[in-house]
Image (cartoon, coloured by chain):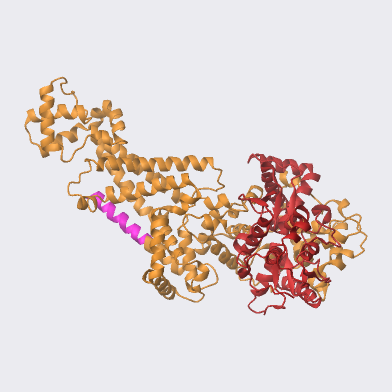
Amino acid sequence: MRYLYFPGCKIASHLPQYDLATRSVLGAFDISLDSAELNCCGYPARDLDFTAAVFSSARILAVAAKKELPILCPCKCCFGSLKHADYWLRHQPGLRHRIAAMLREEDLSWEPGVPVRHLLSVLVEDVGLDRVREKIRKPYTGLPVAVHYGCHALRPAEVTRFDDPLAPTIFEKLVQTTGADPVDWPLRLDCCGYPLWGKNDRLSLKLMEKKLSSAHMAGARVLITACTYCQLQFDTVRSGQETLPILFPELPAVLVTQFLGVAMGQSAGALGLERNHIAWTASPA
Amino acid sequence: MFLKLCAYLALSICLAGVFHRGLRWFTLRIGPEAEGAGFLDRFKAGAKAFGAMIVNPRRLGSVLWTLLFEVLLQVHILKQNTWRWLTHMALFYGILLLVVLHALDNWITARIFSNYASTLNPFLFLRNLLGVLVVFGVATVVIRRRADGRPRSKKRASDRVALVLLSLLIVSGVVLEAFKIVSPSIFETMARDYMGDDPDEIAALKVYWAKDFGVAFEPPPPAGDNDLLASGQKLHQDYCASCHSKPQAAVLSYPLARALKPVAVRLDRLRPDLVFYYLHYLAACGALALLPFSKLFHLLSAPLSLLVRSGGDAASDLPINRPARRVLGLDACTHCGVCSLHCAVSPIYRVISNPLILPSEKTGALAAIAGGDISEAGCAAFSEGSFICTGCGRCTRFCPSGIDLQDLWQASRIDLKRTGFGSVHDWIRTRSAAEWAQIARARKAVVKPATALDRATVSLADNPESFSACVQCTTCTSVCPVVAASDDPKRDLDMTPQQVMNLLRLQLKDMALGCRMVWDCVTCYKCQEHCPQGVRVADILYELRNEACRRFTVIPKKGVKLPDA
């Protein structure tokens, strides 16, 4: 299986371990990731200008169309942004024509139907739970974990078509293959707060705290994320506050491919675990 | 004498300029560090750190490595693009060697090679070859910049002048040499000085030089007399050959000399060789004087920037040294535009035509800001560009001058926030929703006319169908995590989501633009997902933010303190 790998802006400079772990895990399933120098998906600019955001995503869709490859996003905000662009380009002819004119200047064109896949969908649907289960070497045997869905892949479901927006199961199904036990926690579908980081830091941290508290009260020992922004919030931002001690330090946040990779017997170094600010040592429950 | 004075004047200006630029590294400030530290403290800390880098044997290793592979061989450019490397090598070595071995030939080349004469091979050939390299370099730059679609903005005036001076320097040099080759009066002077006055000898030498050295004589010396030619050749061997190689080796000047031969004698009276010598010399003086005030300064600042980087990045350095690194970095920028070529948000520049979105344009603006030399509008534009940047780090990875651009952007963003030019989320907070409503009403008349691109955009907030289905059930409010995080939504948010939709239903959009709810929205889309009536609540909130960004620009007052979040 071949995908156009679209890591987005933040991974290379702020979360390189997500790239390491994702490549390591996907490599075990014979998935080849094509790389290209791609622009920002436009999500951060959507507050400023809708057309700028759609054009940014449209350009990536057009590059994938040219290469005739589906896109694989490790970040849920990028995934959502591409989906939004695809949605609006399909529904708004005026916007479509204008964007097409701009893309033509670079010899690109947007085609509907470029598959945009998030990492979780690739693992659960394209690879399949059975094949994932086969690769598990060190199961977690009942370790209680909190899977964090985040927002931009789930909602609005009309646009993203990722999973049931009110009762999603894709993340739990994946984690269950490792033998871990995903807990049910009330705020599991809420936002991590990162979109407000740098805009309203106090509120951003408050939202994060509520999430962590909910996961902690449900008895989880690890918080698993599948998005760059979410991991940055629960690991980097959380541990980088000079005036605030780390909230719930016994509940580290770990990327899904790091969590999966350890269960598959891959080394901590290959998964970039030492780069996580809040250390997680995978020990059996 | 006059020329010598010009040279000394140019040199003085150059040294003064370099000194001035160097001083700025320790007086200007970018970023929050080194607050309260004066020039002397900063200079001492910087000198100490630099000295420690040279003295420490492990560090010295990386310094020498950088000197060899990045400054001299520029391998980091080769790894990115072969043509760019070839072009820059041609320019770099062409110009550098011309300066060192030709301009300074009396001081350097003549001292190394005791038989040096500028008209002797290999010096004659090599000088022309270096000229070819420079011409090749400049031509390739011009062609590639047109062809590679690099997003860029206008050239700076000083850079234009530098380019003109360099072109004048090369062209005048070639023309000068060509005229010297063909000039009969120079031949006469040289023959008398180095051979003597014997008219027979001069006549014989003339024949030889007219044939083999391209000199133009009027009337042309008799051809076909082989004895005269042979004796001319012998005279040449005795008196001229120790300094003069055949001019065909001047691959740039000789073809021009041949083309000039028909008119050479007529022009000779005007002493074109002198004219072009003056032009050549004065162009060199001009370039020298201009060096610290144009992109030519990168000859000094870029190697220094690369060396400083080899010792570690800004984050690993003492805080007191970081502003100096940043100002040095800005001085090392050549406005080459490679950063913008790889910038992840450059597509946004195609929609929002603010050139300060592009990193290659931001450096100039940031230098102006640091020097206190920018307007409020300029600051606002720089702010917009700065907060569009996503910090992907590619510009830094590709910069050929080794500038830590990522550090510059992070530091300048802190400065922008502190001077009231932060992101829209910062300055929108400086006024209440009611005040913004008033400003919005007042500015209705001066809103920029919608471009064709705007009209083609999705428009929800102005379309009654978007929220006519809203029945004020307050589901959006009850699922909103931002509302849930507040003890007093009215105090913290002005309006809850369904109240914002109500304002729109009542066509009171202006009153909604400044509401805290709009700006504290975390974009989780729960409202839109749970709305039983299909109202696109989150999309509408986005649109309100877009509209506010279009209609308002930051209007900070001096000394305004932003309220804490």
Image position of B87 with respect to B38: above or below? above
Closest to the observer, B330 or A109: A109
Name, please, the residue furthest toward the left.
Answer: B198
Q: Is B450 covered by the magenta stretch?
A: no
Q: Where is residue A212 in the image (x, y as percent from the top left)?
A: 76, 74
Residue under the point 83% across and 70% down: A184
Image spot of residue A63 (x, y percent): 66, 45
Q: Chain A is drawn in which colour?
A: red
Q: Please tell me whether residue B71 is drawn above or below residue B39 in the rendered image.
A: above
Q: In this view, does B511 lie above or below A32?
A: below
Asked if residue B476 lies left or right of residue B272, the reply is right
Question: Toward which corner of the image does residue B10 lie, by quadrant?
Answer: bottom left
Colour chosen for chain B: orange
Q: Could you tell whether A83 is left or right of B224 in the image? A: right
Coordinates of residue B443 in the picture (x, y in percent): 73, 56
- Asked if residue B269 can be seen in this view, the reply is no
**Of the pair B149 and B425, the residue shown nearer to us:** B149
Tell me which segment is drawn in magenta.
B1-17
> Is residue B178 left or right of B424 when viewed as pictured?
left
Near-viewer residue (A16 or B133) = A16
Q: Does the magenta run of residues contain B8?
A: yes
Query: Image quadrant of residue A111?
Result: top right
